[in-house]
Image: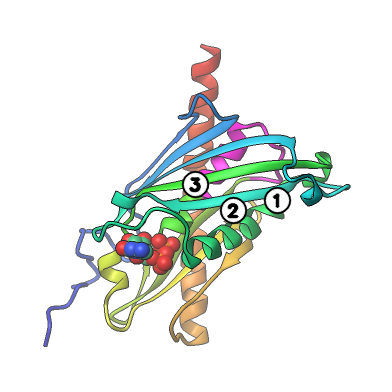
Amino acid sequence: MSEKLINKGIRPDGRKLDEIRPLKIKAGVVDRADGSAYVEFGTTKVISAVYGPKKVHPRHMEKSKKAILKVRYNMIPFSVYDRKRPGYDKRSVEIAKVVSEALENVIFLEEFPKSAIDIDMEIIQADAGTRVAAITAASVALADAGIPMRGLISSVAAGRVEGNIVLDLTKEEEDASDAIDLPVAMLARTGEITLLQMDGDASVDEIEKIVRMTEKGCKDIEKIQGKALIEKYNANTA
Ligand code: CDP
């Protein structure tokens, strides 16, 4: 039998089951954009930049009563072990769509009719959880751009590895034979879920435990997102 990844509740990188990877967030990292953020969940690294609200191109895409979100998710070629072919694929289109849906309901889009808000997310290094890191970064970038929102969206995945419910899976854990992974995004202030995806089979009991675990994770992440924004604000006013 192959060696187990999780022994007595301790994971390969030394974390407990309900711990997120070391999380680093910095707001305002791109001078050229209206808002930006850099996020690291362990060795998963992402940068997000926000432009707008601005005019819509092409014009026929504009909405008379609200702004539209144009979300772009991209993995740079050296973000993964097998160099990724530059450009978009089905996966990046799907992730851009779910990220857009995870963010749009908390943004006051009706305040900016006939406008567009561009959200770019570049995955610099991938070790699972790139979509949740991207959402966490995009939310800080939106706030940094001064876009009015009901609150910050925080995001993390949890799942099952070798029968254990675990928070913030690495690629090594995700690749375990029975592993399932549920990326969740929420308005941490209220607990309102704006993204929940799942591949694989899980019981209702497992799903409940997994979602509860992400709730705690998102609340911790929101605090660090808020701190990053305050640090940026303090640096600008010093
Ligand atoms: O990254 P996320 O967990 O949101 O999405 P996924 O599609 O479940 O991908 C899981 C992981 O697989 C990524 O984070 C990468 O580490 C890896 N991956 C890869 O190595 N090459 C790809 N072309 C796509 C994903």
Residue sitting at 34 percent across and 78 percent down?
A: 179
Q: Position of residue 50 (x, y in %)?
A: 59, 38
Under mark 2, the amino acid is Ala
Q: Reply above or below: 76 against 95.
A: above
Specify whether tag 1 is near ligand 1 (CB below 8 Å). Answer: no
Mark 2–mark 1 Cα distance, whole angstroms, equals 11 Å
User: Which is nearer the eye, 109 or 18?
Assistant: 109
Q: Are marks 3 and 2 in contact (CB under 8 Å)?
A: no
Q: Which numbered disc, 2 or 1, marks the residue closer to the eye?
A: 1
Under mark 1, the amino acid is Val
Q: Reply above or below: 74 against 195.
A: above
Under mark 3, the amino acid is Met
Q: Secondary structure at mark 3?
A: strand
Q: Position of residue 16 (x, y in %)?
A: 28, 62
Number of labels in the image equals 3
Residue sitting at 62 percent across and 35 percent down?
A: 51
Extent of the magenta region: 135-151
Residue bearing mark 3: 121
Mark 3–mark 2 Cα distance, whole angstroms, equals 21 Å
Residue sitting at 83 percent across and 45 percent down?
A: 110
Residue bearing mark 2: 188
Q: Is residue 104 magenta?
A: no
Bin the neighbour count of mark 1 within 10 Å (Cα to Cα): few under 14, some 14-19, many 20 and up.
Answer: some
Mark 1–mark 3 Cα distance, whole angstroms, equals 18 Å
Bin the neighbour count of mark 3 within 10 Å (Cα to Cα): few under 14, some 14-19, many 20 and up.
Answer: many
User: Which is nearer the eye, 202 or 105?
Assistant: 105
Q: Is residue 146 magenta?
A: yes
